[in-house]
C-alpha cells in the first residue's frame, strides 16, 4: 500500500548505494506472552523522498515456558514511509525456516503397567507471516543514527505438532542502528 502511494505521488528512486544499512534488534513477545529476542540486518533496495523498500535477513529466538523453545531464520521484505518529523510506518512480509524443541509426554506399557515418559523432541517447519509497524527515526531530527519501532506480527508455522499449522500473534519492539 505504501509502495502504491509512492508510485502515485510520482516519487523518483535514488540509487540504493546512498541508502544506509541498518542493524536492528530487540525484544520479541512470541504469542504475546513468551519472551524472546530478534536480530537482523536491513538493506534498503529503493529509497525515494521518505519511502524505502527493504530486505532483511533476521533471526528470532523465543522460549514458551514449559512448552517449547524455537529459532526462526527468515527473510523480511517490506516498505517504510518516514515523515520529515521522523515518524515512520512500515509493512513487511517474512518467510523462512523455524526449528522448535518441545517436550512430549507419552505412556509406556510394560508388563501391564503404564509409566509416564517425557521425551525431548524437535521439529523443523516453514514459517511465514506479515507485520505492520510504527516508530520514530531519530536521525531525521538529531545526529543520532537510530530508529525505534514497535510492530505486531502475525505468523504461521507449517507443520505444527498437530501436523497442520499454527498461527501466532507476536510483537517486536526494538531499535535500528543506521550504518
Image: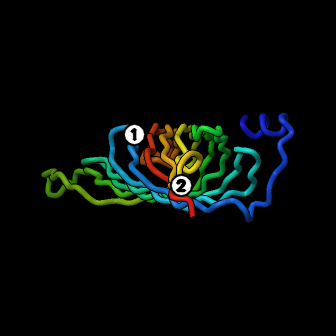
In this orientation, does residue 172 appear?
yes
The numbered mark, 2 or 1, whose residue comes first in the sequence reads: 1
Q: What element carries label 1?
A: loop
**Image point (40%, 47%), residue name:** 28
In the image, residue 66 lies at what x, y percent? 24, 48
In the image, residue 120 lies at what x, y percent? 29, 60
Q: Is residue 75 placed above or below 141 in the rendered structure?
A: below
Q: Is mark 2 on a helix, strand or loop?
A: loop
Near mark 2 (Cα within 10 A), the count class, few <14, some 14-19 or many ≥20, is: few
**Extreme residue in the front direction:** 142
Q: Which of marks 2 and 1 is in front?
A: 2
Near mark 1 (Cα within 10 A), the count class, few <14, some 14-19 or many ≥20, is: some
**Image point (53%, 55%), residue name:** 143
Q: Quadrant of residue 133?
A: top right
Q: In which quarter of the image is the C terminus?
A: bottom right
**Image point (65%, 44%), residue name:** 80
Residue under circle 1?
Answer: 31
Q: Nearer the viewer, residue 2 or 73?
A: 2
Residue under circle 2?
Answer: 143
Tell whether 174 sits left or right of 93: left
Q: In which quarter of the image is the N terminus?
A: top right
Distance (Cα) linking label 2 and label 1: 36 Å
In this orientation, does residue 58 appear?
no
Q: Nearer the viewer, residue 19 or 61?
A: 19
Amino acid at each position: 500500500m505504501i509502495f502504491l502511494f509512492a508510485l502515485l505521488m510520482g516519487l523518483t528512486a535514488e540509487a540504493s548505494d546512498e541508502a544506509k544499512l541498518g542493524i536492528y534488534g530487540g525484544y520479541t513477545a512470541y504469542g504475546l506472552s513468551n519472551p524472546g529476542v530478534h536480530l537482523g540486518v536491513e538493506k534498503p533496495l529503493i529509497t525515494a523522498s521518505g519511502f524505502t523498500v527493504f530486505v532483511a535477513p533476521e533471526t528470532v529466538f523465543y522460549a514458551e515456558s514449559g512448552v517449547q523453545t524455537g529459532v526462526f531464520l527468515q527473510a523480511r521484505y517490506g516498505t517504510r514511509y518516514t515523515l520529515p518529523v521522523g515518524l515512520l510506518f512500515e509493512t513487511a512480509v517474512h518467510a523462512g525456516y523455524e526449528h522448535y524443541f518441545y517436550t512430549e509426554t507419552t505412556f509406556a506399557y510394560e508388563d501391564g503397567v503404564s509409566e509416564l515418559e517425557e521425551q525431548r523432541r524437535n521439529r523443523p517447519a516453514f514459517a511465514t507471516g506479515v507485520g505492520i509497524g510504527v516508530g520514530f527515526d531519530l536521525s531525521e531530527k538529531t545526529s543520532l543514527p537510530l530508529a525505534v519501532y514497535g510492530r505486531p506480527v502475525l505468523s504461521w508455522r507449517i507443520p505444527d505438532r498437530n501436523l497442520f499449522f499454527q498461527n501466532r500473534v507476536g510483537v517486536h519492539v526494538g531499535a535500528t542502528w543506521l550504518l
